[in-house]
Image: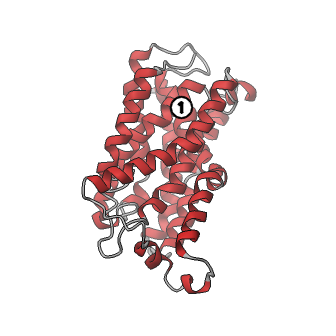
């Protein structure tokens, strides 16, 4: 138990702070509408970083700050060229993966696309559409470009709040704390990836138990989202372990947050897609996502940081 005291401290702070921030949703002091979810969701994203800071301040005071930053992935890693390539891959590859997941969902019949009419997008805009002097197709294209090329850098701020905790500190710690000792062999990589993904999914419970991401499922959304977190977390973990830097995972996380919802707005308003089935975070979307995970680990295997 004492050997893992830092892990328990990290989890206590990350989970405890997230529930504390979400408390207004559960006491109904704050309405459950999108603005409240978005604001509290952004604040909650910083709680894993609070956990990392708590560990450093109480359990790793003897570790120099520079060494702690390197061990937790805040540098660009030993091979900056590789990290740069992964940053570009995260920025452009994740939106491509989101698009592939949407097409797979359409092929599976769980989403009806209305690319020509953009009926669901128009319905989402509602009265705002009358105030914007642009064709909806042009407006959507502008938003799509912004979501791919600009929003990830804005979203990177809260995404770092999560990724410094989950992939920056927790994943390497589950593999053998690189800040204080040599890491174990690659045989522990997959169990650590799965465990960190499950923990990441459970951490979302203050929001997902309220139906966040899968509103049709209610509290069952919390269970389903764990599956997505394990698969997507494995991809983020691969980026972290390949680069020895947290930044590619930060950009990938920020990119999926920027593009996943916008992609589903290409659906038909007459038959809106069920996000539990469609899109990259839906069950059908997990298939191409998992395929990419298996391919990258096969072609570019990783080992624990050393």
- The reply, left or right, for residue 245 in relation to residue 13 is right
Closer to us: 257 or 107: 107
- The reply, left or right, for residue 181 in relation to residue 112 is right
Decide: few, some or many residues near mark 1? Use Cα within 10 Å; few <14, some 14-19, many ≥20.
many
Q: Measuring from the top left, give residue 11's x and y in whole percent.
A: 48, 41
Residue at the disc numbered 1: 239
Q: Measuring from the top left, give residue 166's x and y in whole percent.
A: 52, 38
Q: Name the residue located 55 percent from the left edge and 24 percent from the top edge.
A: 242
Please tell me whether mark 1 sits on a helix, a strand or a loop. Answer: helix
* The quadrant where residue 146 appears: bottom right
Count up the numbered dots.
1
- The reply, left or right, for residue 131 in relation to residue 187 is right
Q: Measuring from the top left, give residue 285's x and y in whole percent.
A: 34, 48
Name the image quarter holding the N terminus: top left
- Vertically, is 112 above or below 291? below
- The reply, left or right, for residue 292 in relation to residue 41 is left
Q: Name the residue located 44 percent from the left edge and 71 percent from the top edge.
A: 118
Residue 72 in view of the camera: no
Residue 253 in view of the camera: yes
């Amino acid at each position: 138990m004492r050997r893992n005291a830092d892990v328990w401290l990290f989890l206590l702070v990350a989970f405890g702070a997230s529930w504390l921030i979400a408390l207004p949703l559960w006491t109904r002091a704050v309405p459950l509408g999108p603005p409240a979810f978005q604001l509290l969701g952004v604040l909650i994203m910083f709680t894993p970083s609070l956990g990392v800071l708590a560990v450093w301040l109480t359990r790793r005071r003897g570790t120099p700050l520079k060494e702690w930053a390197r061990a937790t992935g805040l540098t660009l890693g030993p091979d900056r060229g590789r990290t740069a390539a992964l940053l570009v891959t995260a920025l452009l590859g994740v939106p491509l993966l989101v698009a592939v997941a949407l097409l797979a969902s359409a092929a599976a019949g769980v989403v009806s696309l209305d690319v020509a009419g953009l009926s669901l997008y128009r319905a989402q805009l509602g009265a705002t559409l009358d105030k914007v002097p642009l064709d909806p197709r042009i407006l959507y294209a502008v938003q799509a470009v912004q979501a791919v090329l600009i929003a990830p850098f804005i979203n990177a701020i809260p995404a770092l709040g999560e990724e410094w905790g989950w992939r920056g500190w927790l994943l390497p710690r589950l593999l053998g704390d690189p800040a204080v000792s040599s890491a174990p062999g690659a045989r522990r990589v997959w169990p650590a990836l799965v465990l960190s993904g499950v923990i990441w999914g459970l951490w979302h419970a203050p929001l997902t138990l309220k139906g966040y991401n899968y509103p049709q499922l209610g509290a069952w959304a919390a269970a389903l989202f764990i599956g997505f977190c394990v698969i997507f977390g494995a991809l983020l973990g691969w980026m972290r372990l390949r680069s020895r830097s947290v930044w590619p995972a930060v950009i990938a996380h920020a990119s999926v947050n920027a593009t996943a919802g916008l992609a589903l707005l290409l659906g038909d308003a007459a038959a809106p897609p069920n996000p539990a089935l469609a899109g990259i975070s839906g069950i059908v979307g997990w298939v191409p996502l998992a395929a990419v995970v298996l391919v990258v680990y096969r072609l570019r295997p990783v080992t624990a940081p050393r």
